[in-house]
Amino acid sequence: MAAVCNLGIALNRLGGNRELLRDLIGFFGDDAPKLLSQVIAGLQADDARQVQLAAHSLVGLVANFEALPSQAVAAQIEAHARGGDLTAAACLLPELESSIRDLLNALGISPVAQSAAQPVAPNGSTQLPKN
């Protein structure tokens, strides 16, 4: 089973800038739930283009954290939507929701803080894990 994410790689990509990583985590807490909602809305509206665009944005967003499980399922949904197969895309929705939830938790974004985008470590601190 692949790791949810790799903050060491993410930090390395940012030149070791922990403050920038904190900001990126905050942006993720804001944007990921919105993009997931756009995927759901697109599926409900039978709008393949909306699903494709939102899933594509999620692919890029989760790639910042080397979140391979989330990246893979979002890419699959994007590909199905691009091909017009929203039934196949919808079948992957529970997996996408779960992987995004797991990633939010791994990044220390609590359910309450998800809407406020405040990164919170599992121990309640706002310190990023040492990698």
Image: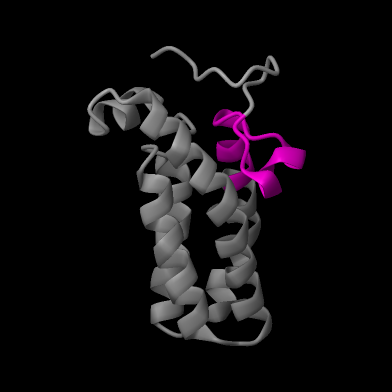
> Which is more toward the observer, 98 or 110?
110
Q: Is residue 110 magenta?
A: yes
User: Which residue corresponds to the image point at 36% horizontal and 43% vertical from the top-left?
Assistant: 64
User: Which residue corresponds to the image point at 59% horizontal and 71% vertical from the top-left?
Assistant: 38
| Image position, residue 60 (x, y; %) | 36, 55
**Magenta stretch mostly in which secondary structure?**
helix
| Image position, residue 66 (x, y; %) | 36, 37
Residues shaded magenta: 100-119
Toward which corner of the image does residue 117 lie, by quadrant? top right
* Image vertical order of residue 125 relative to residue 37, above or below: above
Quadrant showing the C terminus: top left
- Answer left or right for 8 relative to 69: left
> Which is more toward the observer, 81 or 126?
126
* Image vertical order of residue 104 relative to residue 42, above or below: above
Q: How many marks can you see?
A: 0
Task: Identify the colour scheme used.
Answer: one colour
> Which is more toward the observer, 23 or 123?
23
| Image position, residue 69 (x, y; %) | 46, 43
User: Which residue corresponds to the image point at 70% horizontal and 34% vertical from the top-left?
Assistant: 110
| Image position, residue 119 (x, y; %) | 59, 32
- Answer left or right for 110 relative to 19: right
**Residue 119, visible in the rendered structure:** yes
| Residue that extends furthest to the right in the rendered view of this protein | 112
Toward which corner of the image does residue 101 lie, by quadrant? top right
**Residue 2, visible in the rendered structure:** no
User: Which residue corresponds to the image point at 63% horizontal and 36% vertical from the top-left?
Assistant: 118
